Image (tube, grey):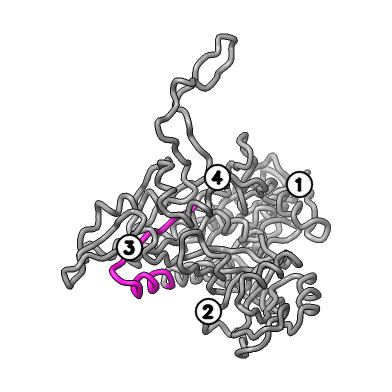
Amino acid sequence: MGQSMTTRGEDYAQWYNDLVLKSGMAEYAAVRGCMVIKPYGYAIWEAMKDVLDRRFKETGHVNAAFPLLIPKSFFSKEAAHVEGFAKECAVVTHYRLKNDGQGGIVVDPEAKLEEELIIRPTSETLMWNAYKGWIQSYRDLPLLINQWANVMRWEMRTRLFLRTAEFYWQEGHTAHATAAEAVEESVKMLNVYAEFMEGTLAIPVIKGVKSESERFAGAVDTYTVEALMQDGKALQMGTSHFLGQNFARAFDVTFLNKEGERDLVWGTSWGVSTRMMGALIMVHSDDEGLVLPPKLAPIQAVLIPIAKGKEDNADLMAAVEAMAAELRRRGIRVKVDDDDTKRPGWKFAEHELRGVPVRLAMGGRDLENGTMEVARRDERSKETLPLTQVADRVEALMSEIQTNLFERARRYRDGNIQRVENFDQFQEVLELGGFVYAHWDGTAETEAAIKEKTKATIRCIPMDGQELDADGAGVCVLSGKPSARRVLFARAY
């Protein structure tokens, strides 16, 4: 096929890059740090969007759309927010080009904007400015808005899907009458994310709270879902933020409460992005290509007829098409690959590279015997079954493969959470990869010192009920000072 890839063992980063490009998920754009999501990759993203959008609406949220450009003055209203994003902002200063008289194009200096505009890195400021006119009394609350959009953060070190200057995401921005309601919303949406990632992406996650230094700029608390990639690095999969009254205060968003008094509203924001595409690749895939969970695979089953001559082609194609029709009737996304310009082996490798969960093959002898070969991508195993059993088996494999991918990833994750008692153990385990479960004294100074010494960060302070043995109080692995509980450290993307 001419599709040879670097293996994970040779160079994990290069393997990832090769796989994104060669599987047809995305490619580099002409704009530095940006990407083109190709149809196959976009179909996966659309499947993610469909599931999430349905879940958002089930929890009472509605979609809206806000401008791409934000007045620069809006950013100065929330100090922590602007400080957090200032180094990543792309700024629009002019609105016209002109011919330079020498065959070139230059910016027209006379077309300078009165106020510079920021290409949105996130939309809190623009949306809270609008909310001021939308919210008058407690009857207008809660306000539950979501936006599907592209944003821009001028990243210096980029990697397809994981970190690009422009990326696609959803951003929820909600307003509430009380702090308790806003916190409840933040946790509820984190749980929506976790259920989606485990049930649809087949990626096990750990839910937790970020340390103060890792919080979203402008948030009171940031909740996160963290996953472990095959190279032992962590990935922040999504976040949900309790904003307190910070943005309401900055944009003077008040309401008349039930007691007839005017009060500031309480806010949240939450989002996941195309970064999940990178996680999907890095958690499940192998040296032969993508491995996709059936719930997200654009093609769930591919049927490949193997005809030796034109004389048996018609009967063979009739049998293959009949099987495809039966699978479609059962709701399975099917492709019949009857391209006679490609050899069967090339087709097998191509669909393996693209992560199709189930491959069905039928040749002349299968036609005579009334059988079909059924191969599953996750285990790279195959079996030959009577035609009467194939549709049932393929249908069963959809849930079987989905479950297997999740359990396999969970076994890997759980096998790479190591408890340590001192800093020597901390450094030793960190070099092996995975989550390091260690005591921390709760100070930003110790957190910064550990990061400087090891490049590891606190991924989260795990939330209760996740079968992580916190074993109560102890002493910090670095400072030796008292620690209330263990937290999760890792090197991360």
Residue 328 numbered tag: none
Q: Nearer the viewer, residue 367 or 215?
A: 215
Instruction: Check whether the beta carbons of the residues at disc 1 and disc 4 lie within 8 A of each other.
Output: no
The mark lying in front, picked from 1 and 4, is 4
| Residue at (69, 50) in percent of width and height | 350
Name the residue that disc number 3 marks: 175
Q: Is residue 441 magenta?
A: no
Q: Position of residue 4 (x, y in %)?
A: 79, 49
Residue 3 numbered tag: 1
User: Would you identify the image quadrant in which residue 166 lies?
Assistant: top right
The mark lying in front, picked from 3 and 4, is 3
Name the residue that disc number 2 marks: 463
Q: Using a 10 Å C-alpha cutoff, classify the residue at mark 4 as few (fewer than 14 neighbours), some (14 to 19) or many (20 or more).
A: some
Residue 113 visible from this viewpoint: yes
Q: In the rendered structure, which amino acid carries the disc numbered 4?
A: Glu
Q: In the rendered structure, which amino acid carries the disc numbered 1?
A: Gln
| Residue at (64, 75) in percent of width and height | 488
Which image quadrant: the C terminus? bottom right
In magenta, the rendered stretch is 169-187
The tag earlier along the polypeptide, 2 or 1, is: 1
| Secondary structure found at label 4 | strand
Instruction: Check whether the beta carbons of the residues at disc 2 and disc 3 lie within 8 A of each other.
Output: no
| Secondary structure found at label 3 | strand
Q: Nearer the viewer, residue 285 or 134?
A: 134
Using the numbered discs, state the Cα–Cα distance from disc 3 to disc 4 in whole angstroms.
Answer: 27 Å
Q: Position of residue 184 (x, y in %)?
A: 38, 74
Q: Using a 10 Å C-alpha cutoff, classify the residue at mark 3 as few (fewer than 14 neighbours), some (14 to 19) or many (20 or more).
A: many
Q: In the rendered structure, which amino acid carries the disc numbered 2?
A: Met
The tag earlier along the polypeptide, 1 or 3, is: 1
Q: In the rendered structure, which amino acid carries the disc numbered 3?
A: Ala
Name the residue that disc number 4 marks: 166
Using the numbered discs, state the Cα–Cα distance from disc 4 to disc 2 in whole angstroms.
Answer: 31 Å
